[in-house]
Image: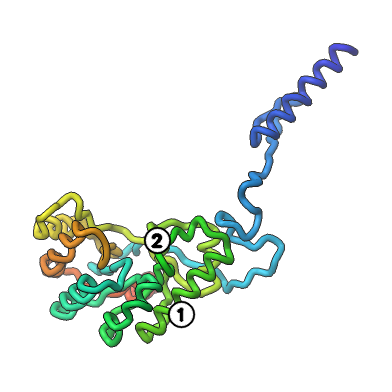
Amino acid sequence: MADGVARWGRRAVLRRAALLGGGAALGVAGTTQTAWIADRRLPLGGGPASATLGSRYQQVGGGVEVVWGVRTDVPLVALTFDDGPQPHWTPMVLDTLAEHGVPATFFLVGERARRHAALVRDRLGGHEVGNHSWAHHDLARMDARAAYDDLRRSHDAISAATGAAPRLLRPPWGHLGGAVLHASARLDYRLVLWTLQMVEGEYPHDPAGHARRIVADVRPGTILLGHDVGPERRLVALRGLPDMISGLRARGYTFVTVSELLRRAAVLGAAR
């Protein structure tokens, strides 16, 4: 009897230790059981990690799509620019795109869109706008209400500045959390990340070299990430943008907006 009590006591201690440790396998009567304990530092609903509001009604539509690029054999590429608008840089990009007849997608920061509305007003015909948050803070650290309020505020500012309501979202740094997904669904956004990013730091003072690198790395269906705001080293990519455009066209590529890329991929997929 004493041995049985001792064994029961040891099991109870082990079970309690496993619960406190966040879950461990326990051998009881020849079976394996797993004990779990919720991490109380993260709310079960409405917090940064959760894509639900717990037991509350979900104010969303059917869902949200996340894309990095598309799978296609057709040589299409979507050129995107983050973080603007900003004086000098954004007009320089728009001038280059206009000169070469290239459409692009601009993921705008709402606060900058409001402050520099004149930079983009009447200049985005043929281009597309997306939401890149209100002030480029990390949405993945926000709870559901804060993430939604941030994106709603930015959405309204971008709509007012450009005359076009964004239908795409690219969260700063590509950071996703459950609250970001929930807010995106409420706003009926598509979440757009990227397939390939500019690598300006590898080509200091060498715009042509950087352009050759990007041209070589692009594949059909690529969403290409650039910036029209930032440290001066990023100007390498912008100064090499004409070479990038001509190099990709020489490879047979057609430039499209992100939404056009997704639309064409859907049409091609349905035709198969």
In the structure shown, which secondary structural element does the residue marked by tag 1 occupy?
helix
The residue singled out by tag 1 in the image is 156
Pinpoint residue 237: horizontal percent, then vertical percent. Answer: 18, 62
- Quadrant holding the C terminus: bottom left
In the structure shown, which secondary structural element does the residue marked by tag 2 occupy?
helix
The residue singled out by tag 2 in the image is 172
In the displayed structure image, the side of residue 111 where residue 3 appears, left or right: right
Circles 2 and 1 in contact, beta carbons < 8 Å = no
Image height of 74 relative to 209, above or below: below
Q: CA distance from mark 2 to mark 1?
A: 18 Å
> Which image quadrant for residue 72?
bottom left
N-term-proximal mark, 2 vs 1: 1
> Which image quadrant for residue 119?
bottom left
Three-letter code for the amino acid on which mark 1 is drawn: Asp
- Near mark 2 (Cα within 10 A), the count class, few <14, some 14-19 or many ≥20, is many
Asked whether the viewer can see residue 271, the reply is no
Three-letter code for the amino acid on which mark 2 is drawn: Pro
> Which image quadrant for residue 33?
top right
